[in-house]
Image: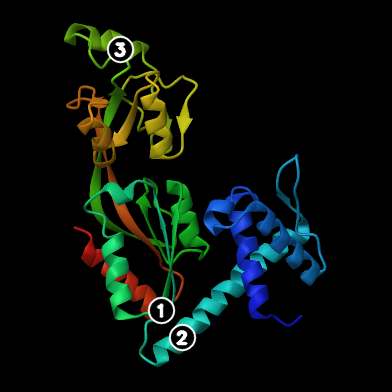
Amino acid sequence: MQVHDVDLRLLRIFVAIVECGGLSAAESRLNIGRSTISSHLSDLEVRLGIKLCKRGRSGFELTEPGRVTYQASLELLQQCEAFTTTVASSKNELSGRVTIATIDTMVSDPRCGVARTIAALKTKSDNIQFDINVCEAREVETSVVNGRSLVGIGVSRHHLRGLDYYPLHNENNFLYCANNHPLFDCKPSEVNKLLQDAEVITSNYMRDKETRNDGLNYQNSAIAYHDEGIAHLILSGKFIGYLPDHYANYWVDKGLFKTILPEKYAYQIPVVLISSKNNPASPLANALIEEIKRCHC
């Protein structure tokens, strides 16, 4: 079949659906409603003449032709981006799609240079499209490995082969409780006893067994994959949990959060810039990496 612009658009929508795990989950990423997404998916299935996925009450699941189409779509879209970038570089222009995968809450860290990087690149060229994907720490690395993102900004305790890791800064995390938790206004003599009884939220980064060596109770009913989820659980007054200080300060300043024994319950996460060793670096990718390094402080 011949591939037209409309087909590329439908393939991008299909890829987003797969990566988000379903039509409803893809709404926020695509910024269109579920019914419109479903219509686009049906159009693509008619265009290709195959059933791409099963969708309904049982959930979202790719068919075998759907899995093949997904992998082929990734390759095709990457080749299209490479073509655009190569042609632009021959004219000494920066052009193409800048895709950045990042962990959440980085926007509240004044040291984060993503916004400054975007401004710098936009000043250099109006022919750049920006795609920022906020995801879990492990997904940041995966996104760079499979070529969905040019770079990632995240944390990694076990570096993957084929990736470069450039240190940006260390993020300080402290243990917090809310003002409706018994630990907030307790006497110093009561802290240790209340800590042993408190339920601590298991976070995405803290799930690694060797990190959880603080002696607290992680056998509970709460787990969160993003810092915003941790904040919701802490605000309930039923849990305590670790958060980056730059993110938690919003509630600390309002008198809603406070740190618990910060001299004891704290750890640092190295925030790194992640890029691929295997993919040939384009002028746009090189410019992006250099600007991120320059703009972080």
Is residue 209 in view from this perspective? Answer: no
Cα separation between marks 2 and 3: 60 Å
Pick out the residue farthest to the right: 49
Is residue 177 in view from this perspective? Answer: yes
Q: Quadrant of the C terminus?
A: bottom left
Q: Residue at left 62%, top 54%?
A: 33
Q: Which SS class for mark 1?
A: loop
**Mark 2 surroundings within 10 Å by alpha-carbon count, few (fewer than 14), some (14 through 19), many (20 or more):** some
Identity of the amino acid at label 2?
Thr
Please name the residue that numbered disc 1 is placed on: 282
- Up/down of 136 relative to 39, above or below: above
**Mark 1 surroundings within 10 Å by alpha-carbon count, few (fewer than 14), some (14 through 19), many (20 or more):** some
Q: Considering only order in the chain, which callout, 3 or 2, is on the residue closer to the N terminus?
A: 2
Q: Quadrant of the N terminus?
A: bottom right
Locate residue 242, reporting x and y percent: 32, 31
Cα separation between marks 3 and 1: 55 Å
Residue 86: image tag: 2
Q: Residue at left 30%, top 12%?
A: 182
Please name the residue that numbered disc 3 is placed on: 182
Tell whether 206 sits left or right of 16: left
Q: Is the residue under label 1 in contact with that under label 3 (CB below 8 Å)?
A: no
Q: Residue at left 71%, top 42%?
A: 59
Q: Which SS class for mark 3?
A: loop
